Image (cartoon, rainbow, N blue to C red):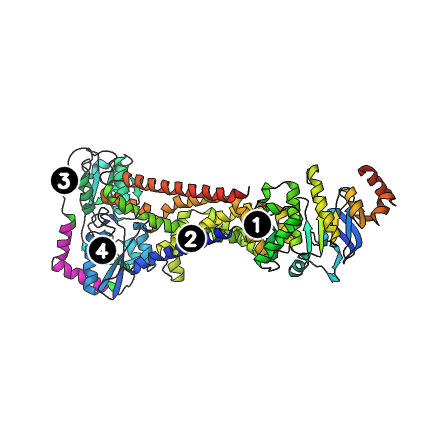
Amino acid sequence: MKKSSWLLLTILMVTISSMLFTPFQQHAAAQGKHAKTLVMGTSADYAPYEFVDTKKSSDVIGFDVDIARKIADRLGYNLEIKDMDFNGLIPALDANRVDFVMAGMTPNAERKKKIDFSSVYYKASQMIVTNQKSIKKVKDLQGKTIGVQLGSIQEKEAKKIASQVNDVAIDKQNKVTDLVEQLKSGRMDAAVIEDGVAVEYLNKNPDLSGFKIPHSDATGTAIALPKNSALTEKFNEQIATMKKNGDIEKIAKKWFEPKKKASDEKRAIIDFSEIFPSVPFILKGIVTTLQFVVVSIIFGFLLGTLLALCKIGGVKPLRWFADAYTSIFRGTPLILQLIVIYNATPQVTGYKISAFVAGVLTFGLNSAAYVSEIIRGGINAVDKGQREASMALGIPKSAMMRQIILPQALKNILPSLMNEFITLTKESAIVAVIGTMDIMRRAQIVSADSYRYLEPLLVAGVIYYVMVMILTVLGRMLERRMSRSD
Amino acid sequence: MIDIEKLHKSFGKNDVLKGISAHIEQGEVVAVIGPSGSGKSTFLRCINFLEVPTSGRIVYQGEEVTAHAAKLQAVRKRIGMVFQHFHLFPHMTVLENITYAPITVNKVGKATAVQKARELLQKVGLADKENEYPNRLSGGQKQRVAIARALAMEPEVILFDEPTSALDPEMVKEVLEVMKSLAHSGITMVIVTHEMGFAKEVADRVLFLDGGLLVEDASPAQFFAAPKSERAQAFLEKVL
């Protein structure tokens, strides 16, 4: 490689490492008037409890958020909000990643095994939401498929229905938005949704109708805290006070009041006009995704090179290690690796790994396994004579590898490497699971906020496509540059 | 200068060298010839340990050469080598090919290395090619660059492994010319070759190998005029 290429690489590395640290600076910026800060975990796709008004800002707002702010303020804390997938909330609490969770969460026996709950701050009942006129009461659900959010109190409710009515199938989805979309596409017949949330959907979708489930578990929503948290008692005091002085009622009125009905005109299947103001919100995800992808690629590439050297080197234990490493990371799903690293790291080491770092670590480690195989193949494909000529000139092994063999190997494997990088760019969408505010997660939030499912995803799709195209062009340019010696 | 004692080399069950002893003097030009499969290339490659001998000793300037990495490196940079297939570094320009090892291994300053490289390119007749990449050169030009690359390390000996065998016939001459002028400069050369005319004209001594054994060790005049062994006679009959 030429000196100028190394210079370019160095500049790139410096840029990236500076990018790597910006997410932490953003965290540090979440300051307020108090000295101490409480971190609240939530899943901002559950309007009106918690969501992002993506047309206006990136802030998580909603019923729960207002209550949390009030309580935190009264207790003398600033509030920092961490958004993540609903299923990740209890593990996050367990791993001490957040101090408490408010996500329209209902206390139940199963959850109580792992975590504590405050007293109930709001009572909601469950609704059946459907787009079929024939479904008017629970009995009508015979032979139907009903959808619920995975791991939610509604899942319990649906099971109860299934035990009372014949032939009811339960379909579990990750998000309420998924439920509504599945309803519209006819994959399910009805969904169990909490009334406060259901009202929003009913308001915006004239096709949908709903009714309250009689005698549904009206146990209400409570704040989730780690087992034996010192905060539980203080939270309970505040909830009691706010109930008494009418604060909670006031906040509930603000969020749960039915808005004016949407017009009866049929909504177009695809209509971008509504999400158009939210496009900048999704676009902001490019920075996160780019940071994430670039750091992962570089980390994966460096580690992959090291592993490749272990594989072709003469030291047997190193070779075994590298082979085992590759086999494990290629042999298990990426999303599984991601969740394990994100949630297991704090439990095993006590270090609260951020979603960004966990993502980079997972993708880097995973990519390294593939890159190491590509590079190993590339090194083996370099003419044996190159090694002999280097040896005959007395060139030390490390210099020979770095300056004679690897540059030639890289040139040959560039197309395969680019392919790996493109895959990584696209698959980075998986980090949305642990709540990194990347393009995918932002698209999901917009779809929850706008009650429009397809459009935000299409926007995200176009962004990913453009990014991959740019990467492809850059790859071609690099290839051309490297082949000037042909 | 180089003492080779009872050199054996086998690849698996195949015994390629079956005990060769020879001595090479300072400043000598030695041609190693023999039928293909006789072990000439292996013999040459054992001298700088590109092949590790199965048994036997190589003593270079009174010092035994061993497979020990650090020592090997010290010896190798004093022994140049030119390969049949050149093995230039394809991602470096001609000039970079020549200056890389002096700068990296001998820690010569860049300016000095470049100046020396240009002198060498002049010598091999390629002064105008310093910024070309190897793939743009003809075989003969590549081999001349390879010779310049070896010379840039200022070796005491240069080993040539069939340096003209991979060349188109019209390019053989330009490489042999360069080698001839080298021979007159007094550097020690060991050349595995099929160019009998060249061996006859330039070499001080001929080593004839057959079946992994050193069959004859004679002056060219003597060897080509009156080979002692039957095998050498048979060989010469075929090639001359």
Element marked by disc 1: helix
Q: Residue B11 lies in magenta, yes or no? A: no
Q: Nearer the viewer, residue A94 or A292?
A: A292
The residues bearing labels 3 and 4 have C-alpha atoms spaced at a distance of 30 Å
- Residue A277, given in percent of the width and then of the height, sits at 23, 43
Circle 4 residue: A222
Q: Nearer the viewer, residue A134 or A86?
A: A86
Disc 1 marks which amino acid?
Ile
Circle 2 residue: A12
The mark nearer the N terminus, 1 or 4, is 4
Which numbered circle lies on residue A261?
A: 3
Among the 4 quarters of the image, the one containing residue B162: top right
Q: Say few, some or many: other residues with alpha carbon within 10 Å of mark 1 (under 14 / 14 to 19 / 20 or more).
A: many
Discs 1 and 3 share one subunit? yes
Q: Say few, some or many: other residues with alpha carbon within 10 Å of mark 2 (under 14 / 14 to 19 / 20 or more).
A: some
Q: Say few, some or many: other residues with alpha carbon within 10 Å of mark 3 (under 14 / 14 to 19 / 20 or more).
A: few
Front disc: 1 or 4: 1
Chain ID, mark 2: A
Chain ID, mark 4: A
Element marked by disc 2: helix
> Which residues are the magenta region?
A232-254
Residue A243 visible (yes or no): yes
- Main structural element of the magenta stretch: helix, strand or loop? helix
Discs 2 and 3 share one subunit? yes
Q: Nearer the viewer, residue A215 or A172?
A: A172
The residues bearing labels 2 and 3 have C-alpha atoms spaced at a distance of 53 Å
Circle 1 residue: A405
The residues bearing labels 2 and 4 have C-alpha atoms spaced at a distance of 48 Å
Chain ID, mark 3: A
Discs 2 and 4 share one subunit? yes
Front disc: 1 or 3: 1
